[in-house]
Amino acid sequence: MALVLHSGAGNKNAYKALIAAEYSGVKVELVKDFQMGVSNKTPEFLKMNPLGKIPVLETPEGGIFESNAIARYVTKLKADNPLYGSSLIEYARIEQWMDFGATEIDAGLARWLYPRLGFGIPYNASMEEFAINFFKRSLDALNTHLANNTYLVGHSVTLADIVVTCNLYMGFSRIMTKAFTSAFPHVERYFWTMVNQPNFKKVMGEVKQADAVPPVASPKKAAAPAKEAKPKEVKKETPPPAKAAAEAVEEEAPKPKAKNPLDLLPPSKMVLDDWKRLYSNTKTNFREVAIKGFWDMFDTEGYSLWFCEYKYNEENTVSYVTLNKVGGFLQRMDLVRKYAFGKMLIIGGTPPFKVKGLWIFRGQEIPQFVMDECYDMELYNWTKVDISDEVQKERVNAMIEDQEPFEGEPLLDAKCFK
């Protein structure tokens, strides 16, 4: 009996086994005319997977479900298959990235895409923002790894590449536009390299990137209940028109969105956007114009200044990886753009490079929602600036100005968050 894969056409989870089969020289037949909602409800199918989910691989020994398990089975049918690496550590790392594909890429995409398509949890704008930030964190981790690696493990395609690429496929083809993925250039390069490999292309065909984020699907209306015998009419007092209208408005009015805690702080004399414009528009006499203007505007009661320094500078041995690391951090700080301004300096002429920064935050503490939602914050030591100390105040000036040398060392780069 041949191996038979039960799945609908275009299923990215089925692609995993089919691509692995192409690399391994294993014959897997895809069921023709599979109809979701019909084929997966038969007693024969439910015997292989009681959940009724796809894909399912039918083997001489019985059925296998869960797409990664199916891909593993197909791969191991070939002895010493290079798709599983050439050593125990490579095998472990392949499994590591397969788990990453499931728990980070797949889960992140599902949180973002499915509510828009009307699947599972109803769409909620605040939850979508959280989902996108969660997903960006995963992509940034993948992007950092791929900055120095063509493949996820070793120097050729492994099962990890097959699984992660198939998980990324739904994102690239359904919701991840070029404007979104351009922030992760190494992930882009990796994905398009993989899907254009002959064995991938044979299964997937031509892959096209999404042109736009899909609109939110309209809620499905529940089917009208069957008509029942008309109950005996009971007279009910009709409320006055004004009261009825008020009740209707109360029922239909959407719940107000919770305010950001920083919006509840007392008004500040400092308008952060004014400072950002002054910073951006000052091209000459920076000290006399921008720096002086900053201290004229700065409100010690409404805002606070913070120095930060990366905890693991000894790891910053590759310049572009360090720059990507800082760029990813700034991207994930989008959630606080309305309430903050930052300068990040990458310091040193030779590795390891030092990463140090200056941040202005609304309020007297680093906002708690930033600490909770931006994991990079934990990678830095944070020190509140004492502006009564002239030495610290001059350090603030030097960081805003991108002064070089900075603390006796050249600047590799300086990045601004505004």
Image (cartoon, rainbow, N blue to C red):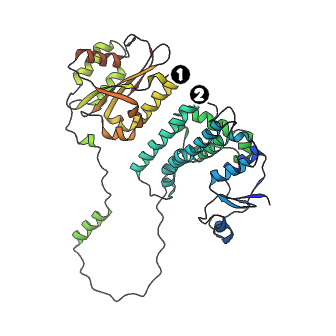
Name which residue lies at 32% across and 23% down.
278
Which element carries disc 2, helix, strand or loop? loop
Q: Which of the 4 image quarters holds residue 254?
A: bottom left
Q: Residue at 50% across / 14% down in the picture?
A: 350
- Give the residue type that dot 1 points to: Val
Q: Give the residue pinned by disc 2.
A: 148
Q: Nearer the viewer, residue 47 or 125?
A: 47
Q: How far separated are the C-alphas under marks 2 and 1?
A: 9 Å
Q: In the rendering, which numbered label is found on residue 272?
A: none
Badge 2 or badge 1: first in the primary sequence: 2
Q: Foreground residue, 122 or 311?
A: 311
Which percent across, then down, holds residue 327? 46, 29
Image label count:
2
Is there any visible trace of residue 367 in the rendered image? Answer: yes
Q: Nearer the viewer, residue 172 or 186?
A: 186
Quick check: 138 above or below 418?
Answer: below
Find residue 224 and report its horizontal and vertical position in percent.
47, 75
Query: At x 24% / y 21%, what residue is drawn?
Result: 295
Q: Which structural element holds mark 1?
A: loop
Q: Amino acid at mark 2?
A: Asn
> The N terminus lies in which quarter of the figure?
bottom right
C-beta proximity under 8 Å, tags 2 and 1: yes
Mark 1 — residue? 318
